[in-house]
Image: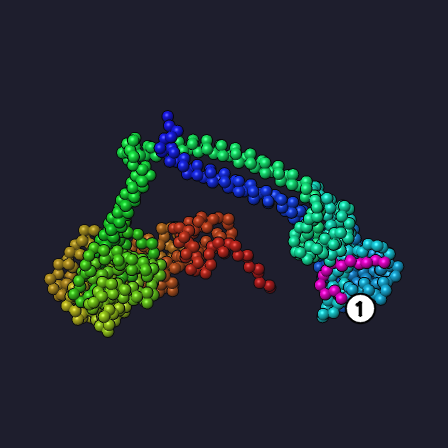
């Protein structure tokens, strides 16, 4: 059972009590404010009423405006405006124009009459017929034209559509007209006049009074003159006088005793609206509202305190349980929230330390994986993928490139945080990848969707050398960009060759790899490339025939003593991969052992001949019938048949054809002008375009159905190829067929 003055309960209740007290003071302030605001509630009500009347009238007038535009574009009307004489006899199109105007006047409640006056013809066409101007005015119950053509002159002087009052001499009341001049070449060729029924406007007032009964009179004014009113308690002269006063004072409302009036203006029609109401009766509603608010405030205060006490008890229970779990005693004077804050801080620090250790551990795993790659221990794509999964390394992009930096003594940076600093430097240059130390060099493996520009790579290398070798000479080499995991070791060797070729023109030179760098240390690179192509094509007899050239121009042509061993290791690795693809596992291991244990260059050459001869025999024995066809053609056939398979790619096709990834990629591009991946993506995008335009499938469903691993990858490839997104293509309207 909780004591009312329990320490923890009172602590929880304290902010609630402060809030409730504040709310009570706020209610008092709001009450005073509401008292003043409700005094102006009638103004707001009348503003709404005026807005309603204005909206209704403007809506009705807008119908007239739209029809006037239609008449202006009428072909018959246009023809009459360009004529210099009245057609005799009057043509059928003119009568059809008359019928159209008559039908509109009959169907529109607001339109009392409508005619078009042509000054050049002195001719009018309206709902009453097609007559001369004098005759038409006579049909309007005007027996003769007004003196000196006052109304006609007034019409001719109008420049823009406007509302006018047509003062008829036979009646005391003027007719409200909407006048629209129609000009050609800056001269008035026709004037359209619509007569507006004031009784229709008064009916709109009646509807408004049903919604706002406190208003006892509504009026509409044009240029300060009352043209329509509902209610007769205030005469027109008084309304016009009050309007003039309002126009001078520029105030929304005017009061006179218990009577108040509110004015507003329509920006569409230019009409002014006035509403009159009894302000004394309205204040009774204000006082009633204030009393209700006061009672509600007191009830809220009472319920708030009771609810606060109950909520405080509920909030204290989990705090008590948590304090008990933390070892706090029942009568412990230690502040509960300070104790909780201290323990939470300890947990956050422990979590941060754990995250730090996880990051350092992952950096160590990334480094070990990278070193394994650089040592050449992973010779196949599948082996690299398995090792990456084992080390927790994920490559999100298809392109790879290696950077190497080292000083003259090949000493590594001191301390344990140099890797973190390199990652931070890479992040500052918006590049991603791995870093490690290998054989006295700083090695960085970049992973991107497309090759980084040379200025970005050079700036990154400069920043790293300035950071780790600020006061000693150092150099950096940039290797080739590749799209295969097994080619990373090649990019590393290229970076090392570029590093050896750096000229000391500055403290920290950066050199980008070129084939000339490899030729100085690895012999003629073209010879090795041709030899590799024969091996990739499984043309072992041709590879055997060029062994003398390979031996003389590649294996023994280096100027660096250690280069001979590196070149020999490269050839051994190449032949070992070929043996794994052609021979059994035991025979392949034997080939690797035989090549690796050669004691001299002469013995190594002899063993290469024996290995190539054995590979050639085995290849001729195992070659299936389908090998008679070009590899590129069979690769294209496989892709054409299975491009919607998400697993379809360079690696899968090369495995099915029993060739290397690099050879298949090069041969396919030479045969078709595009890479295998580009051709595959082209087929998938074309299939996706068809699904986008012809099916209601979602973008994610289309991506999976087209062979993409995810919708994100699909959108990236689609935008790169089509220069638009799938969603924009679906929203784009279909192109109209070209005219025959």
> Can you name the residue that lies furthest to the front here?
257
Report the residue marked by disc 1. 120
Residue 169 at x, y percent in the picture: 85, 58
Q: Secondary structure at mark 1?
A: loop
Q: Residue at x 77, y 53 (%)?
A: 237
Going by the image, does 57 lie left or right of 3? right
Most extreme residue toward the right is: 143
Residue drawn 29% across the image and 36% down it:
334
Q: At which x and y percent is residue 674?
A: 38, 63
Front in this rendered view, residue 536 or 410: 410
Q: Quadrant of the C terminus?
A: bottom right
Residue 2 sits above or below residue 599 on the image: above
Q: Is residue 303 above or below residue 740?
A: above
Examine the structure image and report whether residue 159 is included in the region drawn in magenta.
yes
What residue occupies the far left of the structure in this picture? Answer: 599
Could you classify mark 1 by the number of other residues whose Cα lies within 10 Å: few (under 14), some (14-19), or many (20 or more)?
some
Going by the image, does 395 lie left or right of 78?
A: left
Location of the N terminus (image quadrant): top left
Work out whether residue 174 can be spotted: yes
Across the whole image, how many numbered discs are drawn on residues? Answer: 1
Q: Residue at x 42, y 54 (%)?
A: 714
Q: Which residues are magenta?
A: 157-169
What residue do we see at 27% from left, 64% from top?
A: 463
Q: Out of 523 and 113, give the one closest to the viewer.
A: 113
Q: Give yes or no for residue 133 being in the magenta stretch.
A: no
Q: Nearer the viewer, residue 156 or 229?
A: 229
Q: Measuring from the top left, give residue 608's x and y in whole percent.
A: 17, 62
Residue 104 seen in the current view: no
Q: Is residue 401 above or below residue 697?
A: below
**Display colour scheme:** rainbow
Which residue ends up furthest to the bottom in the rendered image?
A: 505
Q: Position of residue 449 (x, y in %)?
A: 35, 59
């Amino acid at each position: 059972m909780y004591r009312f003055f329990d320490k923890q309960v009172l602590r929880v209740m304290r902010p609630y009590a402060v809030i409730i007290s504040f709310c009570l003071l706020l209610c008092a302030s709001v009450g005073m404010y509401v008292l003043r605001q409700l005094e102006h509630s009638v103004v707001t009500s009348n503003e709404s009423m005026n807005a309603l009347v204005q909206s209704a009238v403007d809506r009705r007038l807008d119908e007239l405006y739209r029809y006037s535009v239609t008449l202006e574009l009428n072909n018959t009307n246009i023809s009459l405006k360009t004529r210099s004489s009245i057609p005799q006899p009057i043509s059928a199109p003119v009568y059809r124009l008359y019928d159209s105007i008559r039908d509109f006047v009959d169907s529109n409640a607001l339109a009392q009459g409508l005619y078009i006056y042509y000054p050049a013809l002195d001719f009018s066409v309206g709902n009453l017929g097609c007559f001369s101007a004098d005759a038409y005015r006579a049909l309007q119950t005007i027996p003769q034209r007004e003196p000196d053509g006052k109304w006609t002159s007034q019409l001719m002087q109008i420049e823009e559509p406007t509302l006018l009052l047509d003062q008829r001499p036979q009646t005391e009341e003027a007719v409200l007209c909407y006048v629209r001049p129609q000009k050609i070449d800056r001269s008035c060729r026709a004037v359209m006049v619509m007569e507006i029924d004031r009784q229709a406007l008064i009916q709109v007032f009646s509807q408004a009074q049903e919604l706002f009964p406190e208003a006892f009179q509504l009026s509409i004014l044009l240029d300060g003159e009352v043209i329509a009113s509902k209610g007769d308690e205030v005469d027109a002269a008084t309304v016009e006088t009050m309007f003039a006063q309002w126009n001078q004072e520029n105030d929304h409302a005017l009061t006179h005793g218990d009577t108040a009036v509110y004015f507003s203006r329509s920006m569409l029609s230019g009409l002014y609206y006035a509403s009159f109401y009894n302000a004394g009766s309205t204040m009774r509603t204000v006082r009633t509202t204030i009393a209700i608010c006061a009672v509600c405030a007191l009830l809220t205060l009472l319920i708030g305190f009771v609810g606060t006490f109950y909520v405080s008890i509920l909030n204290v229970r989990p705090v008590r349980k948590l304090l008990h779990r933390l070892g706090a005693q029942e009568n412990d004077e230690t502040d509960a929230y300070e104790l909780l804050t201290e323990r939470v801080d300890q947990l956050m620090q422990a979590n941060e330390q754990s995250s730090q250790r996880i990051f350092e551990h992952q950096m160590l795993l990334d480094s070990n994986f990278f070193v394994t790659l650089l040592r050449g221990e992973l010779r196949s794509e599948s082996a690299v993928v398995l090792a990456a999964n084992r080390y927790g390394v994920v490559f999100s992009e298809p392109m790879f490139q290696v950077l190497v930096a080292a000083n003259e003594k090949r000493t590594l940076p001191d301390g344990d945080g140099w890797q973190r600093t390199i990652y931070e430097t890479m992040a500052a240059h918006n590049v991603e990848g791995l870093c490690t130390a290998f054989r006295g060099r700083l090695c960085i493996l970049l992973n991107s969707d497309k090759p980084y520009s040379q200025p970005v790579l050079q700036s990154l290398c400069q920043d790293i050398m300035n950071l780790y070798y600020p006061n000693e000479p150092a150099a950096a080499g940039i290797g080739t960009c590749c799209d295969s995991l097994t080619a990373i070791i090649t990019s590393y060797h290229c970076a090392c060759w570029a590093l050896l070729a750096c000229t000391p023109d500055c403290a920290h030179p950066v050199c980008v790899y070129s084939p000339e760098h490899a030729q100085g240390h690895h012999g003629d690179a073209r010879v090795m490339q041709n030899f590799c192509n024969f091996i990739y094509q499984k043309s072992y007899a041709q590879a055997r025939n060029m062994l003398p050239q390979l031996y003389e121009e590649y294996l023994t042509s280096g100027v660096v003593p250690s280069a001979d061993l590196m070149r020999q290791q490269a050839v051994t690795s190449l032949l070992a991969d070929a043996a794994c693809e052609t021979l059994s596992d035991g025979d392949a291991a034997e080939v690797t052992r035989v090549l690796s244990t050669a004691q001299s260059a002469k013995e190594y050459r002899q063993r290469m001949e024996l290995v190539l001869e054995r590979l050639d025999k085995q290849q001729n024995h195992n070659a299936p019938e389908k090998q008679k066809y070009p590899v590129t053609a069979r690769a294209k056939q496989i892709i054409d048949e299975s491009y919607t398979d998400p697993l379809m790619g360079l690696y899968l096709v090369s495995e099915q054809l029993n060739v290397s990834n690099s050879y298949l990629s090069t041969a396919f591009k030479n045969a078709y002008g595009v890479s295998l991946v580009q051709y595959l993506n082209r087929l998938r995008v074309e299939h996706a375009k068809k699904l986008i335009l012809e099916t209601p499938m979602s973008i994610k469903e289309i991506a999976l159905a087209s062979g993409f691993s995810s919708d994100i990858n699909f959108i990236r490839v689609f935008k790169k190829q089509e220069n638009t997104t799938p969603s924009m293509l679906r929203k784009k309207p279909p192109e109209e067929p070209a005219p025959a």
